[in-house]
Structures are given as structure tokens and as C-alpha cells.
Image (cartoon, helix red, strand yellow):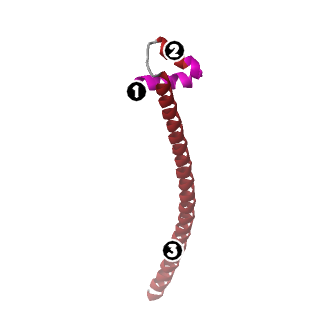
Amino acid sequence: MPDLRSTVRQMIEKGLGEEEIKSNLRELGIQDVDAIYSSAVAQSESAAETSGMSQNSVEQLRQEGLDQSEGLEKKLEEISAQVKALNEINQKILDTNRQILLRLK
């Protein structure tokens, strides 16, 4: 039965109509065609909803990633500015030390 449902889902995806699918199943000698068709449609709808939810999840994750990257860029800029300021302070310290050493000689 699960194979029949997947076959019916494939038929639906290919654009076959409900009656055409049911008549094909009857021609193959399959019993309870209505139940099989309903079950396949329900599984298709469930799969579509899951796919839609996963698409939403992907979009949410993408947006969160963008938000985080923007925050990281700001932090990186701040850290870069701090490193530059420290470098300038170190340079001033070195200059001062040179001047002191020159006075001692």
C-alpha cells in the first residue's frame, strides 16, 4: 500500500486528474481505490506543509545569519579601531623611551 500511495503522489505531481488515477488503479485490480487516493493526497499535503515550514526555517536562519554577521562586522570595526589606538599609544611610548634614552647618554 505505501508503494501505491507514492505512485499515486507521482501521478498527481505529473498532473493526472483524480478520476483518471482512480480508473487506472481499478484497471490494475486494486481494491479500495478511494482510500488509497485520499491517503496519498493527505501525505502529499503533509509533505507540502513540511516543505513550506522548512522553507520558512531556512529563511529565518538566513535572516538570523545576516543579523549576526552585521553584529560581527560592527564588533570587528570596533576591535580594529581599538587595535589602531593601542598601536598609536605603543608608538608614543616608544618615542618617549627613545627620548629618555637620548637624554641619559
Q: Residue at x 53, y 46 (%)?
A: 58
Q: Amino acid at mark 2?
A: Asn
Q: Amino acid at mark 3?
A: Leu
* Amino acid at the residue labelled 1: Pro
Q: Nearer the viewer, mark 3 or mark 1?
A: 1
Does the CB distance between marks 1 and 2 fall below 8 Å? no
The mark nearer the N terminus, 3 or 1, is 1
State the CA–CA distance, disc 1 to disc 2.
17 Å
Can you tell which mark lies on residue 24?
2
Rendered residue at 51%/72% (across/down): 87
Mark 2 vs mark 3, foreground winner is 2
Magenta residues (range): 3-20
The residue positioned 48% from the left and 34% from the top of the image is 43
Q: Which residue is mark 1?
A: 2
Q: Which mark is residue 57?
A: none
| Up-down relation of residue 64 to residue 24 (above or below) | below
How many numbered discs?
Answer: 3
What residue is rendered at 53% in x and 63% in y? 76
Q: Mark 3 near mark 1, Cβ–Cβ under 8 Å?
A: no
Query: What is the C-alpha distance between the residues marked 2 and 3?
Result: 79 Å
Is disc 1 placed on a helix, strand or loop? helix
Determine if the magenta segment contains residue 40: no
Badge 1: residue crowd in 10 Å (few <14, some 14–19, many ≥20): few
Q: Quadrant of the C terminus?
A: bottom left
Q: N-terminal of the two: label 2 or label 3?
A: 2
Identify the element where label 3 is drawn: helix
* Number of the label disc, if any, that sits on residue 86: 3
